[in-house]
Image (cartoon, rainbow, N blue to C red):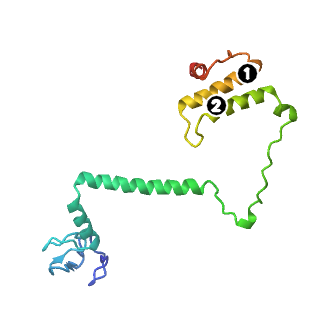
């Protein structure tokens, strides 16, 4: 701990522990060798060891790392600190609230979509469904679909639904396959 007032005349001391009024010099004794040092000394003038635990720790750490690694570590930990603060401010500004379980709305039952009988019996839907069923019978449904299999499914959908798209969208040409659809999308 650094003294700020002279123990003799109660005047302010300089950074080196010297009183300008009475000339008293404050000295701090080294714990390791007993050498007298000025109060602001980081290292002992006799043995060279750090006068505080933080200085000794930093000196030991610096002996393991080169200066370039020290800079990288400082920047890394500064980035972690900045990121933590940024996340703290970002999430706190989002208005996150804790809802007690009794305050949450009750879960409602999912109501399935009901189709009109004419939609279910339409020839378009039946044709699409049968084509997809026929294709899926040949495949193992537990495996992940490949790109070629997805193209076949898109081709089935295009073949069955192309005439509807012609009536809805007059600007685009009717599509014949998944490749033509991709080409048309990439050209736009």
User: What's the residue at 64%, 31% (across, down)?
Assistant: 135
* Above or below: residue 138 compared with residue 188: below
Where's residue 16, x and y in %?
23, 71
Looking at this view, name the residue that lies furthest to the right: 117
User: What's the residue at 23%, 69% (across, down)?
Assistant: 42
State the SS at label 1. helix
Looking at this view, name the residue that lies furthest to the left: 46
Where's residue 72, x and y in %?
31, 52
Q: Which residue is mark 1?
A: 165
Q: Which residue is mark 2?
A: 135
State the SS at label 2. helix
In which image quadrant can residue 28 be found?
bottom left
Residue sitting nearer the eye, 3 or 116: 116
How many circles with numbers are drawn on the protein?
Answer: 2
For the residues marked 1 and 2, what is the alpha-carbon distance in whole angstroms? 23 Å
User: What's the residue at 75%, 64% (across, down)?
Assistant: 103
């Amino acid at each position: 701990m650094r003294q700020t007032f002279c123990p003799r005349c109660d005047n302010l001391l300089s950074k080196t522990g010297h009183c300008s009024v009475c000339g008293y010099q404050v000295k701090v004794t080294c714990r390791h060798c007993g050498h007298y040092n000025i109060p602001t000394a980081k290292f002992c003038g006799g043995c060279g060891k750090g006068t505080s635990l933080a200085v000794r720790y930093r000196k030991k750490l610096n002996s393991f790392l080169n200066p370039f690694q020290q800079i990288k570590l400082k920047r890394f930990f500064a980035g972690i600190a900045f990121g933590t603060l940024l996340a703290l401010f970002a999430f706190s500004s989002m208005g996150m609230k804790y809802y007690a379980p009794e305050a949450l709305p009750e879960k409602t039952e999912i109501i399935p979509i009901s189709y009109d009988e004419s939609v279910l019996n339409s020839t378009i839907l039946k044709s699409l469904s049968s084509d997809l069923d026929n294709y899926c019978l040949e495949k193992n449904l537990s495996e992940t679909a490949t790109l070629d299999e997805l193209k076949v499914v898109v081709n089935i959908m295009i073949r069955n639904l192309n005439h509807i798209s012609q009536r809805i969208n007059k600007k685009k040409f009717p599509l014949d396959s998944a490749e033509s659809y991709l080409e048309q999308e990439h050209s736009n």
